[in-house]
Amino acid sequence: MKVTCLQFDIVFGNPSANKQRVQEEITKAMVGAPDVIVLPELWTTGYDLTRLDDIADTNGAESQLFLSNLAKEHHVNIVGGSIAKKTDAGITNTTYFFNRSGDCIGEYSKVHLFKLMDEHLYLKAGNTKGHFKLDGISSSGVICYDIRFPEWLRAHTTDGAEIVFVVAQWPLARLEHWRTLLISRAIENQCYIVACNRSGSDPNNEFAGHSMIIDPWGEVVAEASKHPEHLTATLDLEKVPQVRKQIPIFADRRTDLY
Ligand SMILES: O=C(O)CCC(=O)C(=O)O
């Protein structure tokens, strides 16, 4: 399974400019014939939280249609980063997953809101897991700050996830946390981690880039620079059962104690 993360700079508070950008980036990325394209967190609006009421996508409908059409047109699976989804219950930071036919095969709203970037003041937390099947492979998607909660990713891998996609706007100031947390989540869950971060900056933060693809042994298969780029790697999914057999941590867990 060949995966490409689209790491790019996001235009602050400008969904139409960002959509145009994503359309161009996906067209460019398809030259390498990936099976899966991954976008970063809040890629339509950026962290323009004070204006979300005006620029969030009602029911996520426009973003879903946009991504579904791209998936269909390019015959590619898309892990749709995340967008600000507005409903009567409030605004959530929501990711959608699409198969090659353009069907939406899953949806996940960030469950851990990041207070350091004021998310709790503008967003509502989700309450469900982010599972989906990608070309038959059990996969999950989580969002940025979620990676600081090992029990949340564990809950996905004990349900069977073999690939965990992470979409993010992770600041440069904590780049080493990003790298260490992602590698740890891969080692402890013996799964592939495919993590797509943005690059560039907004009025409040400079972002780290450094999208990463990590195998179930914790080896970094590919890592981007700080700058906009497409990060591609081929996942060898045989490695998941191999590593899980070699060190059987799922069987050895003491669920009677914790
Ligand atoms: O946990 C962190 O340091 C960064 C998290 C973050 O930027 C986010 O969740 O958007």
Image (cartoon, rainbow, N blue to C red):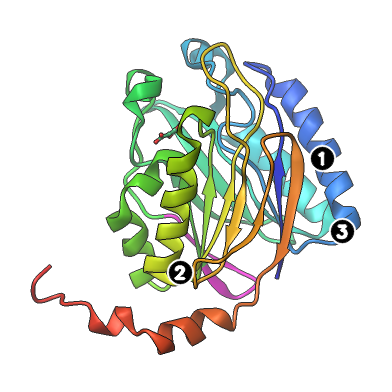
Q: Quadrant of the N terminus?
A: bottom right
Question: Is 210 drawn above or below residue 234 in the view shown?
Answer: above
From the top left corner, tell me how far across and down residue 144 is, in percent. Answer: 46, 41
Secondary structure beneath dot 2 equals: loop
From the top left corner, tell me how far across and down residue 124 is, in percent. Answer: 35, 30
**Looking at the rendered structure, which numbered label has been put on residue 161?**
2
Secondary structure beneath dot 1 equals: helix
**Looking at the rendered structure, which numbered label has been put on residue 25?**
1
Q: Give the side of residue 91 with respect to residue 35, left or right.
A: left
The residue drawn where x is 83% and y is 50% is: 29
Q: Residues within 10 Å of mark 1 (few under 14, many from 20)?
A: some
Q: Residues within 10 Å of mark 2 (few under 14, many from 20)?
A: many
Closer to the chain start, of discs 3 and 2, is 3
Label 3: which residue? 32
Q: Is residue 132 magenta?
A: yes
Give how far apart the Cα atoms at labels 1 and 2 are.
28 Å
Q: Residues within 10 Å of mark 3 (few under 14, many from 20)?
A: few
Quadrant assignment, res 26: top right
Amino acid type assigned to the residue bearing label 1 in the image: Glu
